[in-house]
């Protein structure tokens, strides 16, 4: 009789929980939403999230407040905080492709399949130097690096980020060695290049655009297969100049946000509607055009598939380059095809 009573109690509790969840989803959102951005203020992930969520707020019917939670490995501090929040749709996790390496870099023990992703923008990486450095071309920089191993100071986002992978791949491709200095995000690394703390910076065209246009940065080569037009200038392709770079490059970017997989489906649908409306808005289109971002607008199965592929590609690239702390095979991350 006792076990029957317990079973009945569990059934009633489950039914009550389901009804409560359905009601919460139906009323979503009834308060402000928080977007926990895993990278520093001023970087591409931060700026994109602020622009996208501001536009989404108009369609979803509430404010979306952006907060930066940086640190850890591959943005693991923000990932952990976002993941720890209740999966009710009131917490978004602002992230990029670089967060997919958190597991192999020892930042946390989960794979990307714990999230559902919303990919907003993408922009290619570029190798630039400060205006007071002596190098006028990529060939000059490469020659100096090879003649002076470890002397050139290069900065990028944190260890395990897309930009860090690009630094490693660039070194491998030119058979040279630089002194890598990690920063909590792209903005911090670019500020370091401005102050002369580092010599070379590898971040995206979108993030460097204004600094290049102002003359503070001298772009030497993009990590793309073809030259890149930026305003009136055409920046040469580093991959064309050094074909050996193609072994690991180019690697695409994916900036946006995610929610816990357990968030109710109806809530995710509401978020997706606001997301797509924001992507199609004039203000977001203008932002992308002016800042050299490609609008992606992927969510659901399409976005999840892309991030899973990037997790595989980035994790195994880091492992092969000797930079990963955890063997991706032990995490169940398959090798990229």
Image (cartoon, rainbow, N blue to C red):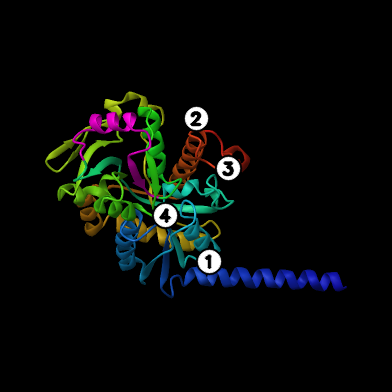
Which residue extends farthest top? 243
Q: Could you tell which of marks 2 and 1 lies nearer the N-terminus?
A: 1
Q: Could you tell which of marks 2 and 3 lies nearer the N-terminus?
A: 3
Mark 1, secondary structure of its residue: loop
The residue carrying mark 1 is: 85
The residue carrying mark 4 is: 95
Which residue is rendered at x = 33% and y = 29% of the image?
146
Is residue 270 rendered magenta in the image?
no
Question: Left of 72 or right of it: where is 295?
Answer: left
**Disc 4 residue crowd, few under 14, some 14–19, many 20+, Cα 10 Å:** many
Which residue is rendered at x = 30% and y = 51% of the image?
197
Question: Left of 198 or right of it: where is 72?
Answer: right
**Disc 3 residue crowd, few under 14, some 14–19, many 20+, Cα 10 Å:** some
Q: Which mark is residue 337?
A: 2
**Disc 1 residue crowd, few under 14, some 14–19, many 20+, Cα 10 Å:** some
Image quadrant in which you'd find residue 136: top left
> Residue 333's x, y, as percent?
57, 40
- Real-space Cα separation, disc 2 to disc 3, in angstroms: 20 Å
Which residue is rendered at x = 48% and y = 38% of the image?
318
- Real-space Cα separation, disc 3 to disc 1, in angstroms: 26 Å
Image quadrant in which you'd find residue 331: top right
- Real-space Cα separation, disc 2 to disc 1, in angstroms: 34 Å
From this view, report whether residue 163 is shown above or below residue 26: above
> Residue 17's x, y, as percent?
62, 70
Q: How many marks?
A: 4
Mark 2, secondary structure of its residue: loop
Stretch in magenta: 134-157
Q: Which mark is residue 140?
A: none
The residue carrying mark 3 is: 326
299 and 211: which is toward the camera: 211
């Amino acid at each position: 009789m006792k076990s029957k009573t317990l079973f009945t109690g569990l059934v009633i509790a489950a039914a009550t929980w389901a009804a409560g969840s359905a009601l919460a989803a139906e009323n979503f959102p009834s308060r402000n939403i928080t977007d926990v951005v895993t990278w520093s203020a001023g970087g591409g992930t931060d700026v994109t999230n602020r622009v996208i969520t501001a536009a989404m707020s108009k369609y979803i019917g509430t404010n979306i407040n952006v907060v930066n939670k940086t640190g850890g490995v591959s943005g693991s501090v923000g990932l952990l905080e976002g993941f720890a929040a209740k999966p009710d749709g009131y917490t978004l996790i602002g992230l990029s492709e670089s967060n997919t390496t958190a597991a192999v870099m020892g930042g946390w023990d989960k794979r990307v399949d714990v999230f559902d992703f919303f990919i907003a923008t993408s922009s290619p990486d570029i190798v630039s130097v400060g205006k007071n450095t002596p190098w006028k071309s990529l060939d000059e920089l490469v020659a100096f690096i090879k003649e002076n191993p470890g002397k050139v100071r290069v900065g990028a986002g944190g260890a395990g980020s897309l930009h860090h992978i690009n630094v490693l791949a660039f070194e491998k491709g030119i058979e040279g060695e630089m002194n890598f200095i990690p920063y909590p995000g792209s903005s911090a690394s670019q500020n370091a290049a401005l102050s002369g703390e580092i010599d070379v910076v590898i971040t995206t065209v979108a993030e460097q655009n204004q600094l290049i246009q102002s003359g503070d940065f001298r772009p030497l080569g993009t990590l793309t297969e073809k030259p890149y037009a930026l305003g009136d200038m055409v920046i040469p392709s580093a991959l064309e100049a050094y074909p050996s770079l193609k072994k690991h490059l180019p690697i695409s970017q994916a900036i946006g946000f995610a929610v816990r997989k357990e968030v109710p489906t109806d809530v995710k649908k509401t978020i997706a509607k606001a997301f797509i409306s924001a992507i199609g808005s004039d203000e977001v289109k203008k932002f992308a055009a002016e800042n050299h971002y490609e609008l992606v607008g992927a969510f659901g199965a399409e976005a999840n598939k892309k991030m899973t592929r990037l997790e595989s590609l980035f994790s195994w690239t880091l492992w092969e380059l000797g930079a990963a702390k955890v063997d991706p095979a032990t995490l169940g991350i398959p090798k990229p095809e």
